[in-house]
Amino acid sequence: MAAFLWALLGIAAGACIATQAPINTMLGRGLGMPVAAACMSFLSGAVLLGLVVLATSAFEGRAPDWRAPAAWLYVVGGALGAFYVTTAIYLTPRIGAAALMAFAVSGQLLAGILLDRIGFLGMAVREVTVGRIGGAVMLVAGALMIRFL
């Protein structure tokens, strides 16, 4: 049962990403600058996450150790998110939300296969198999079909 709930949570997260792209695109039009929309998206997310940290800290009776040094690699996560959101804002009106999501998921899968293979940042190493490659090829083919057919 828990595996089913985790899958539903993953689907809901994906739906949020698909919905976020057109919302941010409209915000970019309203602000007159797509990058400003990305900034607003991250700012609102940061405020919400800050409130969640405060609530979680109060509930758990402990606070995060903000003094811990952040390695450059961990800061890159925010930069990667900024790249995705900004790119999505530019691409959504040009190729549509479905094509954007199809290409984004294809990129996630291809990167995931590589990251699994090298055990990136201590992840469990997973071999590249014919099934994984076949699945990736089918997903990329599906993304191309969504965009061009």
Image (spheres, rainbow, N blue to C red):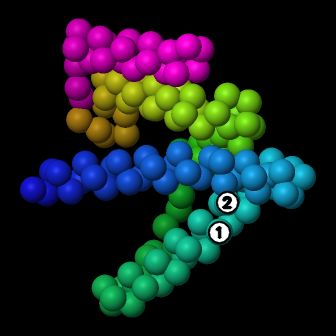
Residue located 52% across and 71% down the image: 49
Foreground residue among 124 and 88: 88
Q: Secondary structure at mark 2?
A: helix
**Is 137 covered by the magenta stretch?**
yes
Q: For residue 98: magenta?
A: no
Residue stretch in magenta: 125-149
Query: Mark 1 sits on what residue?
Result: 44
Instruction: Mark 1 and mark 2 in contact? Answer it, CB < 8 Å.
Output: yes
Instruction: Pick whichever, 43 or 65, lies toward us.
Output: 43
Is residue 83 among what the camera can see? no
At which x and y percent is residue 52? 46, 77
Q: Is residue 27 above or below residue 116?
A: below
Residue 81 as seen in the image, left or right of residue 29: left
Q: Is residue 66 above or below residue 13?
A: below
Residue at the image point whose x is 23% and y is 26% from the top: 126
Q: Amino acid at mark 1?
A: Ser
Name the magenta segment's main secondary structure.
helix
| Mark 1 residue crowding within 10 angstroms, few (<14) / some (14–19) / many (20+) | few
Q: Name the residue that disc number 2 marks.
A: 41
Q: Residue furthest front?
A: 149
Q: Is residue 28 left or right of residue 88?
A: right
Residues at marks 1 and 2, CA–CA distance in whole angstroms: 5 Å
